[in-house]
Amino acid sequence: MGLPGGFEFTGIACGIKPSGKLDLAVISSQTPCVAAGVYTQNIVRAASIEWNQRLTPTDGFKAIVINSGNANACTGQRGIDDNQTIASIAAKHLDADENQVLVLSTGVIGQHLPMQETTNGIAQAISEQGGSEDHFELATMAILTTDKGPKTVESVVSTNSGDIKIAGMAKGAGMIGPKMATMLAIIISDAKISSDSAQQILNRAVEQSFNRISVEGHTSTNDALVMICNGNSEIEVESDESLREFEKAVTESCIQLAKQIPADGEGASHLITIDIHGATNDQQADSVARTVAASALVKTAITGSDPNWGRIVSAAGYAGAEMDVSMTSLKLNGFLVFDNGQPVQFDEKQVSQALNDQFETLIELTIGSGPGSARHWTSDLTQEYVRFNSEYTT
């Protein structure tokens, strides 16, 4: 498909991570362009979030600097000053204003950034930028923390005037409990669009994607999703039809990126899709989906390939949504295990084997006859997750 033109990327190791792995990425536009953002609702938030929220949406974006290995969160005035220094240094090397530079940070909370290494790294990264797939890949790797590997997407929107390209990258495997987006994600496009339209599209796209995933339900201090559109295609996205097509493609790209996060949940052995039907409205269906996804008992049952459907049905019952138990039915990977409020005969070994053999698990729960529906993605809960997070900083 190819990347949108007019952007440059890189990723380097500058010394933020003690491991020596890549830890600093820069994405820049050759011309000032549109940027929109959606950010964490956590009251405890990183300096980068406050900075970006003040600046977006904008039509004067020039670059974004992303560091991994250090969240720069809960670091007081020094953290705020360090964040501004990052933007200022990048702006200097790009012949831009610091207010044209966004900053994203991810990693351990409560530690100050090693600023000498970081500022030196910014200069080096900008000098090594390029527009190739290899440069893009370096950036996707430099934003990772506990991820097993990069999370990316590329797509094309075909219009009467030509093709619009979209690409994206994300990171996230733990501390995933979104109340907007979650983790870090960047969508880039060569579409020509206003900053207001870009922001509105991003707000709606996040509700169908990043805001419907979880791993353990812990909302991060650094969650951010940024979309950058530089107009390089010269194709304007302003008519109702073009806006719909572009929004559809952006939303699908966000969904594809979002699903890769619980699929890579720390220690995860299953990606779980939860479909709720028959609710009074979509909001109540969403509440049930999130409650089922958050249940440690449901998650551990899937880990053990145990078709213990009572855990799922009972979780739905305390979600606070209207529910007609007499019309409640449940399928696990297509096998009917509970129907109209009654248990049904099924081959437990066969269902267990189906859960064990497939990485993706589908929970389909109907809770009544209403029009409401919702989908949520989560990961299972394994011993490896507990081990990893009990030793995270030690």
Image (cartoon, helix red, strand yellow):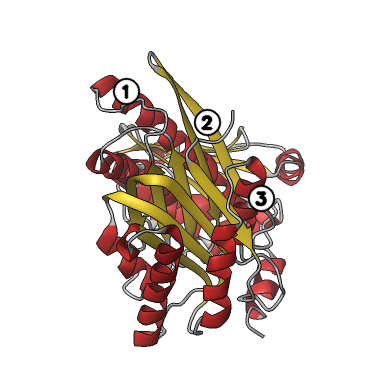
Compare residues 41 and 47 and report the one nearer the observer. 47
The answer to whether the residue labelled 3 contacts the one labelled 1, judged by CB atoms less than 8 Å apart, is no
Crowd rating for badge 2 (residues with CA inside 10 Å; few <14, some 14–19, many 20+): many
Secondary structure, mark 3, is loop
What residue would you read off at disc 2?
A: 155
Q: Nearer the viewer, residue 184 or 3?
A: 3
- The amino acid marked with disc number 3 is His
On the rendered structure, is 54 left or right of 76? left
Name the residue beneath numbered marker 3.
270
Q: Residue at x 45, y 42 (%)?
A: 188
- Above or below, 393 against 382 in this view is below
Q: Earlier in the sequence, mark 3 or mark 1?
A: 1
Disc 2 and disc 3: Cα gap in Å? Answer: 26 Å
Residue kind at label 2, given as amino acid type = Ser
Alpha carbon distance from label 3 to label 1: 37 Å
Q: Is residue 117 above or below residue 90?
A: below
Q: Is residue 101 above or below residue 333?
A: below
Viewer-proximal residue, 282 or 213?
213
Whether residue 275 is visible here, answered yes or no, is: no
Mark 1 residue crowding within 10 angstroms, few (<14) / some (14–19) / many (20+): some
Query: The N terminus lies in which quarter of the figure?
Result: top right
Q: Which residue is mark 1?
A: 242
